[in-house]
Image: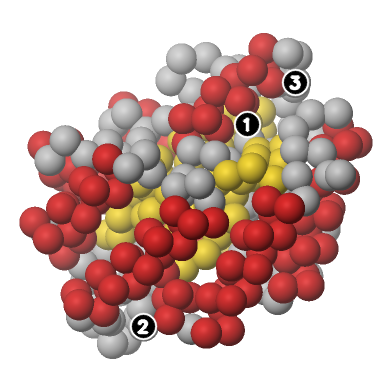
């Protein structure tokens, strides 16, 4: 029997395809299918992203979507704000080099507006995920002031300077980020953001720009590779003598792709049958705090 690995299912709700985004009727159909999948396979626990980009500043906080987010969170599921300014750009906008994460101050008012809108609707959004796994120290410090307690941007080993991606040396299990270095462990003090890394096999990929076969990433991997990554995470739990807390990334478009949808379901079953447990953001926070209290809060990679 595998040791316990705790998994946060991270669902990217981007309105694919990028160049011809789905209308609301199709987006909601996918969202409802994904909600049913989470209830059936993950004990009703998962994080869905609220998309924001120059093309869609208001769409996903409009009344119709607000009603869906309210139902989603009322059932015990979580939301994460997902900034995609570099992918979903206006036709007139400049290139994404350098990325928005190199100038995070341009996002501050946008983030405030979205979170205030959700709060007015009595919808809690306590998590963040940067587009393409991008991030910055300045943005993390700002997110703390806005009540963000957890972050799903980390993908250990990835590095893509132009997109603000630098997770070199990041821990492979959930950690509280060190002040001044998002890729290192810090103290579990009040206000510290919990970083929940994408499940990883510990191998630095040749192409370090995007998470593919070395990560728990449904759409950019294959079933046998996902199972191999899972085995590596389970072995890490044995070697370290502590449970691992990681995320598993998938996208809503998978539920209407027969192959990817079946792969996702098969992997979710595999996780549950091989020592995995799906957890919420609050549970991930509590579990990691307990590990820190138990003396596992050292800096750097484990």
Q: 210 and 90: which one is in front?
A: 210
Q: Which residue does the numbered mark 2 point to in the structure image?
A: 17
Category of crowding for the residue at label 3, using alpha-carbon neighbours closer than 10 angstroms: few (below 14), some (14–19), many (at least 20): some
Report the side of 189 relative to 15 (left or right): right
> Based on the displayed image, in which of its 4 quarters is residue 205 positioned?
bottom right
Closer to us: 223 or 97: 223
Is residue 27 placed above or below 133 in the rendered structure?
below
**What secondary structure is found at the residue carrying circle 2?**
loop
Figure check: 105 above or below 50 = above
In primary-sequence order, the first of circles 2 and 1 is 2
Query: Residue 10, position in %: x, y?
Result: 49, 54
User: What is the x, y in percent for residue 66?
Assistant: 16, 52
Residue hosting label 1 = 175
- For label 3, the residue is 296
Disc 1 to disc 3, C-alpha distance: 10 Å
Give the vertical position of 149 relative to 98 (above or below).
above
């Amino acid at each position: 029997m595998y040791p316990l690995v705790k998994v946060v299912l991270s669902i990217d709700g981007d309105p694919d395809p990028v160049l011809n985004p789905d209308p609301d009727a199709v987006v909601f159909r996918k969202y409802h299918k994904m909600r049913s999948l989470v209830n059936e396979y993950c004990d009703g626990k998962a994080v869905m992203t609220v998309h924001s980009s120059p093309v869609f500043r208001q769409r996903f906080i409009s009344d119709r979507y607000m009603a869906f987010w309210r139902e989603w969170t009322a059932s015990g599921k979580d939301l994460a704000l997902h900034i995609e300014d570099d992918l979903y750009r206006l036709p007139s906008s400049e290139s994404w080099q350098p990325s928005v994460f190199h100038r995070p101050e341009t996002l501050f008012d946008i983030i405030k507006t979205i979170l205030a809108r959700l709060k007015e609707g009595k919808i809690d959004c306590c998590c963040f995920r940067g587009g393409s796994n991008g991030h910055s120290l300045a943005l993390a410090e700002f997110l703390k002031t806005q009540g963000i307690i957890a972050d799903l941007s980390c993908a250990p080993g990835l590095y893509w300077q132009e997109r603000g991606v630098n997770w070199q040396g990041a821990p492979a299990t959930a950690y509280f980020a060190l002040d001044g270095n998002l890729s290192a462990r810090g103290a579990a003090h009040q206000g510290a953001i919990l970083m929940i890394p994408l499940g990883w096999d510990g191998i630095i990929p040749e192409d370090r720009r995007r998470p593919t076969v070395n990560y728990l990433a449904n759409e950019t991997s294959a079933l046998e590779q996902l199972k191999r990554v899972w085995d590596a995470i389970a072995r890490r739990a044995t070697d370290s003598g502590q449970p691992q807390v990681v995320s598993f990334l998938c996208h809503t478009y998978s539920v209407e792709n027969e192959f990817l949808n079946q792969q996702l379901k098969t992997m979710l079953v595999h996780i549950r049958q091989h020592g995995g447990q799906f957890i919420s953001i609050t549970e991930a926070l509590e579990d990691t705090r307990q590990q820190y209290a138990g003396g596992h809060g050292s800096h750097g990679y484990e």
